Every structure is written in structure tokens, then in C-alpha cells.
Amino acid sequence: MKEYSIIGKPTPNVDGPAKVTGEAAYSIDITLPNMLYGKLLRSPYPHAKILSIDTSKAEELPGVKCVITGKDTPGGKWGLWRRFRELADQQALATDKVRFIGDPVAAVAASTEEIAEKALDLIEVEYEPLPAVYDPIEAIKDDAPMVHDDFPSNINATRHIEWGDVDKGFAEADYVREDRYVIEAAHPCAMEVHNSVASYDKGTGRLTVWTSTGSPYFVQQNIAEALKLREGDVRVIKPHVGGHYGGKNSTMPDAVNAAILSMKTGKPVKIVFNRDEEFTTTEHRTAQHMALKIGLKKDGTIVAFEAKAITNGGAFTGLGATTLFLTGTFITMPYRIPNYRYDGVRAYTNIVWGTSIRGFGAVPSKYCAETQLDRAAKDLGIDPLEIRRKNAVAPGYEAPGQYKFESCGIQACIEKMAVRVKEKWPNVEKDEGIGYCGFAYMSGGIFNWIDTPYAYSSAHVKVNWDGTVDLYSQAADVGQGHNTVAAMICAEELGIGIEDIRLHMGDTAHAYTDLGAWGSRETLMNGNAIKDAAGQIKQKLIDLARLKLGENIAYDLVARNKRIYLELRPERGLSYYDLVKDAIRANDGVPLTGTGHYTPHNKGMISPAYGMGIMAIKAKVDRETGHVTAQDVLVVHDSGQIINPLGARGQVEGSIHMGLGYGLCEEMPMDQGMLLNPEFVDYKILRTRDMPEIEILDVPTYEPNGPFGAKEAAEATIAPAAPALANAVYQACGAEFFSNVLKPEKVLKAIREKEKKDKESAKSKAPSKAKGK
Amino acid sequence: MKRELNIVVNGESYNFFIEPKTLLVQVLREMLGLRGTHQACDSSSCAACTVIVDGKAVKSCSILALQVNGKQVTTIEGLADGTNLHPIQQAFIDNWAFQCGFCTSGQIMGAKAFLDENPNPTREEIQAAMDGHLCRCTGYNMINEAIRDAAKRLQALEAAKKVPAQRAPQVQKWMQTAKSGKGAA
């Protein structure tokens, strides 16, 4: 691997001092002069016609400045799938009918939050309840209630993926098994709830919105659509964001209604959801049904695989249709599957909608595929790590028409895992087991639903006469540490220090477009754009240095350690600071600027690069209580060239935390569309005492599509945690699971079923056949 | 009817007339503009709003402001010594113990109250003490390491205080290191 001055060195967070002193401002911390507080009135029904709304009493309450209902909004519909107009299905306030419990029907702006809340109680809405549908399988039946009356059915999106000859593959298999799964929904649970401050300038007709988002550009586009404004008249500023995890991609009613109320009142308006609203009305990880069929040779080679998914879409599209697409993709990774078929259906239902939560597509699908693979391995008498090694892809692997792995360290990861597992856990006690799961995830998505005329990512770099650098980009640090990565990439390329870089990020008015932080895209896509921009300036400085040094043109010059010098004769060089001064003087006093961009071209349907690896979890099962303990986690990870080892570790640790929660305790039980656990008291996320220690081993590769060879580190390791845990329990006691949350009662039931099965097979004394169903 | 509240926040005395139902977090955030204290739930279950009242960690969303009448409150804004970060703050930076940072003020204040009571804790003791602090980003292990690191830095500072300066240049040097937060781990 190449040695860099900054890349690959543990670098403290550039936002650290602000975040540890309480100075970091989130949108929830913003207060503007004359600001009003907004609140939304939400539907108590999962599906109902709105017959009438009477706001007169609310309007009379002292302190209330404005009350709006659907008819007062500009009526524009929005969505992220805006290339497909019918899927732009969100609206500021429901007009004709409500589609889930929590669908907003009216909004109030008042001088205090308390008055706004009181005003909500005074709004009288007459509803006519309609039959509702909550399960996606029910929803796609012919006689199901229609969630969107203007849609031909409740089928929101479908996806078919196929390569090879699946039927022939199954015919050639020595072993075939089928499994069905029901996967639970989960909430992203960002610590900072959704909130926005909107300020409309009547004089200019321009709108500024500060909001807790992962993509200022998406919000800018969506607000413009909702309010029928020009995009350029909407400025969106992303301050520090208190957690995203995929739940802050879509533009939500807080931003749009704050904007409408600000336009009506001429004053800034702030809307903050409470935690109950956050749980019940903001996007979650989609619940889904999956049916899998796998065919293998006796030696464990996969010859055919078929997956079917029906996802519980909820009332709107969000990025849920993308999740459906990616479910069919990530379920195959990182294995060589010669014959594959996927059919996915996303159904509209009368619940809040599911979307693109961290590891989207991979998290539910990998749970199903990897627990099935363990059962197949056991039936075939093959070690679970060996079956993964046997089927793991090699560099250059291409899934026809879908994706290609350029850098690919999965084989090396599995080899390293095999060695380390033996050292780390030489003895496995009774009721303990080690479970494995392979994984791979995209480094930024290549999707065509987002109808943007702009590059996927852009960055603008300006070098001032004193050598300080202003870096402008819309790229979003949402906690993952992208600001630090951005500064590191810029500094490395220019051969200067992090302390030379000033960041101006996440503001649509200050920078060209970046599509935001989702699908692990910022390091690769924004990193490439920054490297491009900084590289243009570096070239100018190198050209000037070459001129001034007057050396043979055969020598290569490099920018490093604040100098530009001959690579082979480092003593011959010039100071970066001196060169910058001269270059600006020579440029008629104009600072040095570079504008870089990145758009993946001809890189398949999914992503230009994939992070990947394998995870092992050691777990213990209490056979009396059904309690499962994740004792220890080992992950071997190929993230390409890691930019910041501190940040990368943080991403992996955080992913595993969320993934283990998905496997142990996080669920969203609903009764007739009503969420039953909308507070942290009842919705359990893992606490510090629940977390095992995590050992992370890196297998560095060089990713040709990434800046300095880098690729994702933020999401790949969420998917494998729950399946590795379920596989550990399977290894420990043979209990099989067809749903993801291993609550004690479910574990006990599975253990009893296993014991019953064992007894029956002992009775019949028939030798179990290797050939499955 | 409004009632009088006298409190000392970060060393400054304040006097307010407030509605009795006003929560401490509202006084801090809305009346004093101390926005570093964050609220992340409505059910007293996340500890993001933790501040220190007379040496004890307290969830400022779950206590009436009048209950702290006459008491000393320290918030995240009062932890650093001028521009010098507190060793816990520096340890949080050096160990990447936060990501989005929204729960961080509460984590640091909780850690401060805990380390004042237990200056040399084990991983398990930190887990037990900090179990009420929710974090959705880090997976907690890096927070735990930061707190252990901070404990070492604080102990080095304590040790340095006990040794006369002219006799122990080495300890003085450690003290400087611990204060600046560089390389103490």
C-alpha cells in the first residue's frame, strides 16, 4: 500500500471541539428573531375520508398566528423517485383522505409551542373511517382497500432481476431447500428528532430552511416541488445533524409545513417533532416477507438461488422502492451465484412508510440468505466458514448486467477470519456457538430515480494568498465523520495540513450539488469530487514550481508536507505557501480555485465499488430463559484504503450496535396501524451494558474508483450482525429462526421445536437424508 | 403563579420568575440559551440532557427548575477551563467517542459525575454507571474507552498536584501533557 501523509492516519474529528463543548448547533438549537412555533395535527385513523375541517376556534386562540389545512397548501406533490411522477406521492397536508395514523391534516403557527399544541386540540376534523390494510400480502389482493385511489392497485413498485438459467441450475443441484421469512420493521431512532426552521423573505420571494437532513439537495428539490417554487429560490442549510441512519433522506412534513407557514405569516417558523411523532410518523426500516430457494452441489457450491420479497411499503414511496431493488441485489453478495432470479413487490399499506434505513436492502435480505446458508451447510456436513469461502467471489466478478467488484478482498477476509477465530475462541463451551455472515455493500448508489441534471457530487476549492483553503460542498456530515474525511482528502491532495482547510459544507447556496449522505456515498463520490477540485490547483502549483525550479521535465513533482518538490530529489523544492503567493500574483490577484465533480459512468446498476468482509459472533444461549447474549464480535473488513481509521472504526462499531439491536430487541409491533411502542421506554435499543467488545481486522485493498483507493465503511457491517447472531444460536443449540428479533420467548419456542424434532427423528430412527426438500 | 428561582449555572448567579411547571432543561436552553444540553426523548429515558447539580448527574428534563433552587448547576458549557478543554472532553475527541454528537453533552456530564466518584473505573463499572445514556451512533465501546482514558488523564493531573513543582519536573511535564490532552493515553 502507498504511504500517505494524512490518508490512513488516525485523525480526530474536525468537529470535535464544537461537539464536546456544546457549541455545535443543530437545527433544533436554532432560534431566529420573531420566530413562531409550528405544530401538526395528525390523523387518529389509519384510513379515513376527510369530510370537513373547522379551524375557526383554533384561529381565535390568542397567540395563534396561522392555521392551515390541505386546501391552503400549494398542493405540489413530492418524492425522491421523481423521475417517475406517479411515485412522487407525498404532500404537505392530507387533502381528500388520510392514509396512516399520524398523517398530518392541519398545521398551526403560534407564538409559543404550548399555544400551538393547544390550538391543535381546537381544530375539529370530521372523518369517515375507511377499511384499512396493514399487511402487504393482503394489500395486493384484488379486493383490498386502495391506499392511493389514483393508482391502479396497491402495488407501489416491482422489481425483477435474473441471470443465468435458474431452472436448469436447480435441476443440476444435489441439494435444494426452501425457507420463508417474516422480517420485522425497525426505527432508525436518531437522537435528534426531525425538525426544521423556515424563513421566507417576502421582499425577494426566497426561502431559507435549516433542517436536520442527510441531503440538503433533496430537501431543496422537494420543497420547490411542494411549494411550486424555483429550486434556486429555496436555500437549504444543513447544520450539525443529530443522527441520520437513512431516516433523514426524504423531505418530511416538518420542513414543508414550516415553509408554508413562514410564507403565510412572513415570519420564521420552527417545527420540531416530539419523540412520539418521530416513532409513529417518520420513516422506518421496511418489514417484509421473503421466500428463498437455494440449490447447491454436494461440495457446497451454490448453483441456483431464487428470492422473492413482498415489502410492507406503507403509505408513500420514500426510498422504499430502492430498498426493494437493493434487496434483490445485496442478497446475492458476496457470493458467486451462477443462476439467480429475484421478484420483489412493494405494497402500499395504511401504515407509516418504510424507506432506506442504514444498510437498506442488505439488512433483511442477508438475514434470510445467511441463516438459510447455515442450514444448508449443516445438512451437507460442511463447515459454515468453508461454505462461505467456497462461494465467495474473486476480484473482477461480475453479476451479469447488475454489478461488478473491482477491488475485492473477500477471499482474504475469510482466510484471515479462519486463522483469527481459532486463536480468539479456541474453546466453545456448552450452549455457546460461533455464527458467521459474509457481507458486501455499495459505496454510493447509481440510481436513475433521482431526476437530477447535476453531477452526483461536486466540490469547490479556493486557495487564499496565505495558504488557507476554503472547501465548499453540499456533502453532508451527519455524524459519520465526513467533514474530517473531506478535509483529509483535500489536505492530502494539496500536500498541506488539516489545519489549513476551512470547511463550508451542506449549504445549497454555497456549493454545487452533492446528493447527500446515503448509501455510503460521501467518501467515494464526494471524495473524488474534492480530489478533482484540489488536484486542479495542485497542478497549477506544480506547473509554477516546475517553471521556477527549471529542472529537467523528466522529473515528477509531488505536493507533500507543505512543499512541492522533485519526487526523486526531495531537497529540490519550493514552499507551498510561497508558491501560492506567487501563483495568485501571477493570476491577476485572483485566488486559486478548482471545481471538481464526480459522476459514475458505466459502473453497473448499483455502485462503482463495494465494501465487504465477514463477521463472526460468539453467543451464548440460556436454555431455561431463552436469553441470548452476544459475547464477542470479530469482523474482518475490506474497506479499500481506509481514509481515517478512527472514523472507520466508529462506523463499524456503530453499525454492529444497530445490527445487533435488529437481531435482539428492536421491533415495531402495530395494532391496526397503531405503533405500540413509540418511546424509548418500550422501543429497546441496545445500551452500553448490552454491547460486547468488537475486534476489527482490516484487509486493505486498492479500489480504483475511490479517492486514494477508498470505499465504504459506514453500512456494510450492519447487515451481518443479526444473521451471525442467529447462526451462533443455531450452532449452539440447533434452534432455527425465520424472523429476526431473537426475543427470549421466540428462542425458547425454537429450542422446544428443535427438541421435538430431535425426539421424533430419534423415534423413527430413520437416517436423515442429505437431499433436502 | 410565577415563583422565584435562584440558581448558579456554570458559576454565574441567576434570578428568574418562572411558572412552577418549568423544567430545568427549559431554563437552561430557552432562558439561558445554553443549547449544548440536548433533549432527545420525552420520557426520561435517554439521558442526553444530563447536567450536574451539586455534584450529581441529573436529567434536566425530569426535574423542575424550582427543585434546584439555590443549587449549583454545571452544564457542558461550564466544563472547559476557558479555552482549555476538560480532560474528559479531550479524551472524547482523541478516542472518537462521538459521531453525531447529539447525546455527547449528556455522556460527558454523566462521565464527569461518575469519575468524580470513581476515579479509576473498569469497563464493567463504566457500563453500569453509563447504562442510562442512549447513543445511536457509536455502539458505546469508544465512549467507554474515552472514559477510561479520561480517568488516566485526571489521575495524572491529581498526582502532579501532590508533588512540589521544583522537585518533579517529569510530573510537571505529564501535567502539561494531560492538560493539553496530547499523548496522555
Image (cartoon, coloured by chain):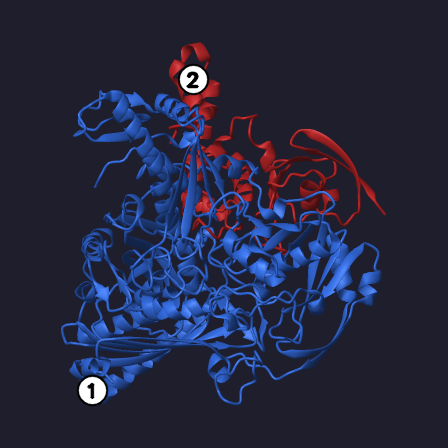
Chain colours: A blue, B red
- Left or right of B184? Residue A209 is right
Image height check: is B122 above or below A229? above
Q: Residue at x 51, y 30 (%)?
A: B86
Query: In the rendering, which numbered label is found on residue A765?
Result: 1
Residue A316 position within the rendered picture, expressed as x and y whole percent measured from the top left: 53, 71
Residue A288 position within the rendered picture, expressed as x and y whole percent measured from the top left: 43, 74
Quarter-wise, where is residue A484 in the image?
top left
Q: Type of residue at label 2? A: Gln
Image height check: is A54 above or below A661? below
Q: Secondary structure at mark 1?
A: loop
Determine the chain carrying the residue at label 1.
A
Q: Type of residue at label 1? A: Lys
Q: Nearer the viewer, residue A331 or A489?
A: A489
Determine the chain carrying the residue at label 2.
B
Quarter-wise, where is residue A125 in the image?
bottom right
Residue A201 position within the rendered picture, expressed as x and y whole percent measured from the top left: 68, 48
- Left or right of A584? Residue A509 is right
Query: In the rendering, which numbered label is found on residue B172?
Result: 2
> Within 10 Å of the Cα at label 2, are there few (<14), some (14-19), or many (20+) other Cα atoms?
many
